[in-house]
Image (cartoon, helix red, strand yellow):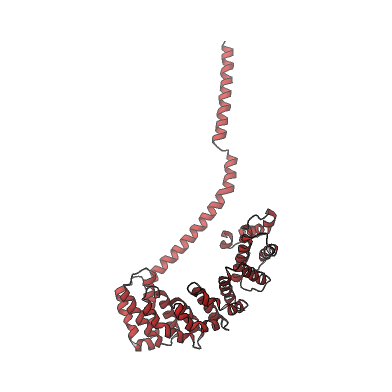
Amino acid sequence: FSTKSGTRNQSQTATSSRSGGNAAHHSEPSASENAESSAGHKPLAATLLQEFQNLKDKFKNEDDAQDKDSPYLNLEKATVLQESRIFHDATVVTQNPRRCCQMITKLLFLLVKGESFTSSEVTEVFFGVTKLFQSDDVNLRRMMYLFIKEVAETCNPDDVIIVTSSLTKDMNTGEDLYRANSMRVLAKIIDSAMLGAIERYLKQAIVDRNAFVASSALMSGLRLFKPCPEIVRRWINEVQEAVNSSSDMVQYHALSLLYKIKQHDRLAVSKIVQQLSKGSLRSPLATCLLIRYTSNLLHEDMNSTNAKASYQFLESCLRHKNELVIYEAAKAMCQLPGVDRTDLSPAITVLQLFLSSPKPALRFA
């Protein structure tokens, strides 16, 4: 009996030890599994967290340093409004434009910080700023344009119209800086009834030899397209000519406006993509836009007659010298509906190369 009992006890002990071992095996991972898990996840997560923390600390230190050195830290609205009365002094305006620039900077600082101004305060300051047109200082004129654009939406529309004649005069001067900035301001403050008076100048400016002027005219068209689409559509010939500009920024803005005009005509958009995908674009930003338009066409119909040529264009962009274009093409290819896995291999190869790039932006992308 004792021998059988002992044998039975040993059997139970072995069984319990086996079941306990199995339970431990299922409840707690082994050391090798922990090592594999750590090797697969922790270093990447730790690296990302460390990189974000470093960026956070860097920007925090920069912000703290800027706050300590900022001369506008303790500005008071009442004091600034009192000081802004120097705009009515013609001697200060003509002989000390730098002081006026500093004054406008203070006003803009308060506006950006969210300081609330009453309608009477805004009107008073706005009329003071209009007095600065008598100065020929370039920097002061640029600050004026910036301020007018900033307060255009909060100021009384009847008051804003007062500066239209001065801005129109600047638009017809020989100074390219005045012409470009005045068009941008006018596009923000005028309505459809007044656009007819300056439409001719804007159309001419689109094909101007100066890239800054041409780009500003195109940006004005983009802004005016929503309230006045029929008027902007009449600029189609000038916009198509601007697409062939030698300036990267003009090409980008021209293609944006051209697509805006043609966006509801699928056949016209398809023709634009076919023509420009042959390599006539120099601007990386314009090429990115073209990639997006091509992707939209493929999303609408993957079986169209031009689908193969469109896909080949996307694939060719993977070999572009600009990294922005390469990423945009890879992203577009990966988002195509029903694409085969083998067709994605070029895009995946490029993205894998980005992961090993020394540039944080490319790794994040």
Q: Position of residue 102 (x, y in %)?
A: 38, 79
Quarter placement of the C terminus: bottom right
Q: Residue at x 54, y 52 (%)?
A: 45
In the displayed structure, 28 sits above or below 265; it is: above
Q: Is residue 303 visible?
A: yes
- Give the side of residue 285 with respect to residue 75, left or right: right
Quarter residue 67 falls in: bottom left
Image quadrant assignment for residue 162: bottom left
Q: Is residue 327 visible?
A: no
The quarter of the rendered structure image containing the N terminus is: top right
Give the residue displayed 32% in from the left and 74% down from the top.
119
Comparing 252 with 15, the one in front is 252
Residue at (56% x, 61% y) in the render:
360
Whole-percent x, y for residue 269 in the image = 62, 69
Image vertical order of residue 101 relative to residue 73, above or below: below
Q: Is residue 163 left or right of residue 205?
A: left
Q: Is residue 309 left or right of residue 84?
A: right
* Camera-nearest residue between 348 and 61: 348
Relative to residue 11, is residue 147 depicted above or below?
below
Q: Which percent across, then down, holds residue 35?
A: 58, 44
Front residue of this view, candidates 107 and 116 = 116
Q: Position of residue 351 (x, y in %)?
A: 63, 59
To which quarter of the image does residue 271 belong? bottom right
